[in-house]
């Protein structure tokens, strides 16, 4: 586990149903135990199963919370989410979607920018000043609901064909 806000692979514990190897062998001098421990390194809370991935997590957020925080929920990372109540619709291809770009704290209305000095929510405030409104193409939607910052393929200029594939000038 790192202290950086970066994605890292997490694994289930060896004592869970996700581990396909069964319990730790009792005879710690056997070849079977050696093979089992090769796939189950120790860590603070026991042993991990390297064959039971739990997904990508944010190292720093997970360390702060004491449990796995999926990379898609990293509090420090910039997210690109659809504006409230906006959806491209199932199967929509290449439609512009209004999005907000900002940190999780801001997108989930938990930052100080939503509250006055007394701690009361500021009425009618659509988003805090940390959020940047933008648009994305519906094709950029990721499985976690965020939108990729990669350009839409329709907006990327086609590469020039290889020189030998170009048509000679007519004369």
Image (cartoon, rainbow, N blue to C red):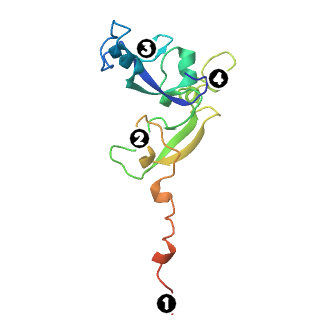
Where is residue 18 drawn, in percent x and y?
Answer: 32, 20
Precedes in sequence: disc 2 or disc 3: 3
Precedes in sequence: disc 4 or disc 1: 4
Q: Nearer the viewer, residue 47 or 120?
A: 47
What residue is drawn where x is 63% and y is 22%?
115
- Marks 4 and 3: CB-CB under 8 Å? no
| Alpha carbons under labels 4 and 1: distance apart | 66 Å
Q: Secondary structure at mark 2?
A: loop
**Based on the displayed image, in which of its 4 quarters is residue 145 positioned?**
top left
Marks 4 and 1: which is nearer the front? Answer: 1
Residue position marked by numbered label 4 in the rendering: 112
| Alpha carbons under labels 4 and 3: distance apart | 40 Å
Q: Which mark is residue 87?
A: 2
Residue position marked by numbered label 3 in the rendering: 47
What residue is drawn where x is 47% and y is 35%?
84
| Alpha carbons under labels 3 and 1: distance apart | 71 Å
Q: Residue furthest top?
A: 26
| Alpha carbons under labels 2 and 1: distance apart | 50 Å
Q: Nearer the viewer, residue 80 or 38?
A: 38
Q: Residues within 10 Å of mark 1 (few under 14, many from 20)?
A: few
Where is residue 96 drawn, in percent x and y?
Answer: 46, 50
Residue position marked by numbered label 1 in the rendering: 170
- Marks 4 and 1: CB-CB under 8 Å? no
What residue is drawn where x is 38% and y is 16%?
34
């Amino acid at each position: 586990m790192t202290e950086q806000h970066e994605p890292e692979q997490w694994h289930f514990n060896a004592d869970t149903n996700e581990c396909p190897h069964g319990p730790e062998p009792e005879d710690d001098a056997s070849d079977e135990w050696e093979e089992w421990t090769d796939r189950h390194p120790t860590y603070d809370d026991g042993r991990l199963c390297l064959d039971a991935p739990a997904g990508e997590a944010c190292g720093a957020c997970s360390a702060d919370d004491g449990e796995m925080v999926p990379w898609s929920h990293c509090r420090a990372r910039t997210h690109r989410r659809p504006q409230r109540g906006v959806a491209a619709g199932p199967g929509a291809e290449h439609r512009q979607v209004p999005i907000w770009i900002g940190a999780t704290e801001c997108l989930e209305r938990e930052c100080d920018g939503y509250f006055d000095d007394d701690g009361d929510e500021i009425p009618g405030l659509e988003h805090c000043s940390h959020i940047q409104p933008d648009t994305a193409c519906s094709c950029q939607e990721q499985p976690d609901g965020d939108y990729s910052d990669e350009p839409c393929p329709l907006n990327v200029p086609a590469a020039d064909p290889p020189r030998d594939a170009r048509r000679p000038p007519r004369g």
